[in-house]
Amino acid sequence: MNRNWLTGLVVLLGVVMQMEAKPPAKKPAELPSFLKVCYRDSPDLNTCARESYEALRPRLMDGIPELYIPSMEPLIVPQVKMDQDSGAIYLHSVYRNVKVTGISKHTVNELRLEPSKLKFIVSLTFPKLHMESDYSIKGKIMMMPLLGDGHCKVDLVNITMRTELIGQEYKKNGANYLKINNVKVKYELSDVHIHLDNLFNGDKALGDRMNEFLNENWKALAEEVRPLMTKALVDILRASVDKLFSSFSYDDLLPKGKN
């Protein structure tokens, strides 16, 4: 049986939006046979892992339910909530029917496994992510009131996200499993463009000025919400990877070499 957990994990780490893959109708008994086997004690482990991932790319468009990976193009997210009431930003916002495009066009910058430390590192770059959704927002940004309920569009340019997972082994049903003890996420981006329709109850003059303000000050605003975004990404990644790790044993996910 071909077995390698990394292919699924890389994609999960690459999805930077609030998402949750739809689980398969029936819990799989084993990993899909189309995955290339990579052994944890192989000197070529990282090369094998990258090759395994590249071989999986054509399947990403439609998703892989067996690995809890949803369809990538477009990625549909029913709802995202983001609230912050510290620093220069006080906002309560909800985004519904979120559609994200551009996720499948990422490149892999780094893909490193350290089985002896149960450490897994992935860095991905997305040239551009385009998001559209219905939104509702109320609050203040840098002392300026912000109120709106309508449609929004956001373009994120040249986003790089580096994720580090550190796991711990435990026994279940006589087999070794992994659980994630620590998740670290760092991300950078080059540019942001945002447009919110129907701000201030449709007042075009106020809405245009607020959109202009948001786009001119995106760097400062992005730093203000960085702790919130980082926490959200950590929570999402932990939940997604935990599903994978609880479904398959460590020897299934990353087996020892054959003697």
Image: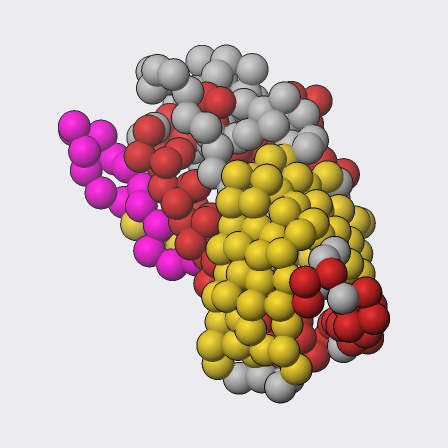
Please name whichever residue, 148 or 215, is drawn nearer the observer in this view of the structure: 148
Q: Is residue 154 magenta?
A: no
Q: Is residue 217 above or below residue 197?
A: below
Tell me the residue at 63%/47% (across/down): 134
Quarter-of-image position of residue 74 = top right
- Answer left or right for 30 relative to 221: left
Image quadrant where one finds the N terminus: top left
Tell me the residue at 73%/75% (across/down): 219
Q: Is residue 245 visible?
A: yes
Q: Is residue 29 above or below residue 195?
A: above
Quarter-of-image position of residue 76 = top right
Please name whichever residue, 47 or 121, is drawn nearer the observer in this view of the structure: 121
Residue 109 coordinates in the image, percent (x, y): 71, 50
Residue 233 coordinates in the image, percent (x, y): 51, 55
- Answer left or right for 120 relative to 135: left
Q: Is residue 32 above or below residue 180?
A: above
Tell me the residue at 83%/71% (across/down): 205
Residue 26 coordinates in the image, percent (x, y): 35, 15
Residue 103 coordinates in the image, percent (x, y): 70, 40
What colour scheme governs how the chains and residues are painted in the rendered image of this protein? secondary structure
Count numbered badges in the picture: 0
Q: Main secondary structure of the magenta part?
A: strand
Q: Is residue 187 magenta?
A: yes
Span of residues in magenta: 169-189
Q: Is residue 12 visible?
A: no
Image quadrant where one finds the C terminus: top left
Tell me the residue at 30%/50% (across/down): 168
- Answer left or right for 167 relative to 38: left
